[in-house]
Amino acid sequence: MDLKTFVIFLAFLCVCSWPAASVRLLTKSRWIVDEESGGRVKLACVNLVSHLESMLTEGLNRQPLKYIANTVFSQGFNCVRLTWATFMVTKPEYQSLTVTSSLMSLNLSSAVDGIRANNPEFLDLSLIEALKRVAMGLGEAGLMVILDNQVSKPQWCCALHDGNAFFGDEYFDPQAWLLGLTTVASAFINVSAVVGMSLRNELRGPRSNLTDWYTYMQAGAAAVHAANPDVLVILSGLNYDADLKFLAAKPVNLLGFGNKIVYELHWYSFTDGNAWEKGNANDLCGSVTARINDHMAFVVRNSSTFSASPLFVSEFGIDQRGVSVKDNKYINCFLAFAADGDFEWALWTLQGSYYLRNKQPGFEETYGIFNARWDGLRNPVFVAKLKPLQQPFQVPFSSSQEAWYQIIYHPASGLCVAVSKGDLKLDSCDGHGLFAFKASEEALGLSDDSQCIAAQGEGQAPVLSGICNNPNSAWQIVSTSKLQIAVNGSIAMLCLDGRSSPLLLTSKCICLMDSGCGNDEALEMQWFKVISTNRKYISNSTTT
Ligand SMILES: *[C@@H]1O[C@H](CO)[C@@H](O)[C@H](O)[C@H]1NC(C)=O
Ligand SMILES: *[C@@H]1O[C@H](CO)[C@@H](O)[C@H](O)[C@H]1NC(C)=O
Ligand SMILES: *[C@@H]1O[C@H](CO)[C@@H](O)[C@H](O)[C@H]1NC(C)=O
Ligand SMILES: *[C@@H]1O[C@H](CO)[C@@H](O)[C@H](O)[C@H]1NC(C)=O
């Protein structure tokens, strides 16, 4: 290939953020970049559990590792957050276990048979060698790996009183934890797929103490960096990874490797108890997003006391059977937040079942992408909805200001407002949706200024119109969630509505005032987020 083609090829790689699995990553302000090209690498990960009692990566009894890794890659993810337990490397009785003896100590002989059938080379490996082999296998499929210290004592995480919650708890000896971090960081130094290590999952519980947080997190970061200077160091806050507010006033002492530090956030529906079950989804989405911005997402912005850093939303997810009212309500709010902030993320979770959980062999994971047999996706529609977020919306350090434009994203369908043969509809967020939202003029128009979106009436499709100063095209963002886009109709406010996707309609705005809205599913069909992007069109997706 000639030089020009090669440069275009490189630009494609960098915008697409699918680096070879062996890149070294750094942070630059709020972005994660590839050290060599300087281009952004957006983490679009899925979690995979290796920290339960067996300390073995789940699923090796169900499918060959290569199948698991290739499935993750083919679904558009570029990384896996792989969990581990400290005791695997600090307790002699666990260090001496092999994959087979670990499973047999739990009476899981049928899991051993499954591994013999699918991944026989794992049977005699020590647990840490097995974890390395998994990371290498993920790397061979083109995936990056983040190692996450989930617990000290291998078990399901995370309860307030499980002995694993905070430094000084029954199983959570800070010195053993530091030794574990050093051991794992060193052991993976030549596993090039590993690009980051999170120091500890979901610090929490009655011992939570800021003095200790600064002492030990800084020591943990230093230990990892000393043992393996190639990895990003990822720090969780307090209260189950839901609070970093204290950092605004007192940043961590970055010890000379500030371009390696990333913060993490966890946000589930149950982070807010049962609030999502009852409340008006507009009010909840507005108030919860405001709290998360205040407690967590401020880290991506500069202030007089804090330098912007990347934020990795390393756990979010839903029951993928679609049976949880609160999960179904929360997820569209989450997706709007995550798309708007263009954060790094990791879905909970990949595994469709466990060797053993809640004392049950083969326990099913309904938040898992895989079904319980690991031979297909539990909910392909949900996984497809994540696609727009797998690409970066923002490419940092772009020299051209003209490159910015807006897209109108509809989280409930995972699609964007697009123009197709002159008609408006919902379509892929790649390569379409050339809108500029002109808030000052209250118009939604094509970025070349030629035409605006105009409402036609309730239940009708909006159209593109050359007349932009008419009430039918005077759009405003309404409601407490700031996710409904409306014009003043002759009788009622009319909102953009995606309920007949891929058709785009306007219908009477619902739940603007009601405290008990009653129909949150219909409401969320009216949720759209206007997102700024400077990403060049990279896909050659066809407009039909
Ligand atoms: C495994 O089975 C043996 C014999 O039935 C039993 O004594 C032991 O408690 C079991 N171990 C576990 C971890 O369930
Ligand atoms: C890593 O690879 C380098 C170069 O191949 C080698 O010198 C070093 O011993 C390896 N380190 C470990 C811990 O395997
Ligand atoms: C936090 O822990 C330190 C020692 O580890 C102790 O001196 C201090 O009193 C604790 N602070 C709170 C608020 O519990
Ligand atoms: C934060 O400030 C630094 C130094 O001025 C600048 O390079 C960076 O782009 C800023 N980051 C954000 C997210 O504004």
Image (cartoon, rainbow, N blue to C red):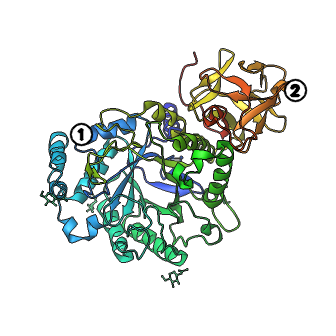
> Left of 165 or right of it: where is 482?
right
Which residue was labeled with disc 2?
Answer: 469
Q: Residue at x 67, y 32 (%)?
A: 526
Q: Mark 2 Cα within 10 Å, few/some/many (few <14, many 20+)?
A: few
Residue 246 position within the rendered picture, expressed as x and y whole percent measured from the top left: 61, 69
Percent x, y of residue 440: 84, 38
Tell me which numbered mark, 2 or 1, is placed earlier along the sequence: 1
Question: Which residue in the structure is indicated by mark 1?
Answer: 64
The answer to whether residue 70 is left or right of residue 78 is left
The x and y percentages for residue 89 are: 27, 66
Which residue corresponds to the image point at 75% horizontal and 21% vertical from the top-left? 458
Disc 2 and disc 1 in contact, CB within 8 angstroms: no
Against 539, residue 240 (above or below) is below
Q: CA distance from mark 2 to mark 1?
A: 60 Å
Can residue 219 be seen? yes
Residue 196 place in picture, x, y as percent: 42, 57
Quadrant of the image for the C terminus?
A: top right
Give the quadrant of the N terminus.
Answer: top left
Location of residue 188 with respect to 348 vertically, above or below: below
Residue 506 vs residue 513, the one in the foreground: 513
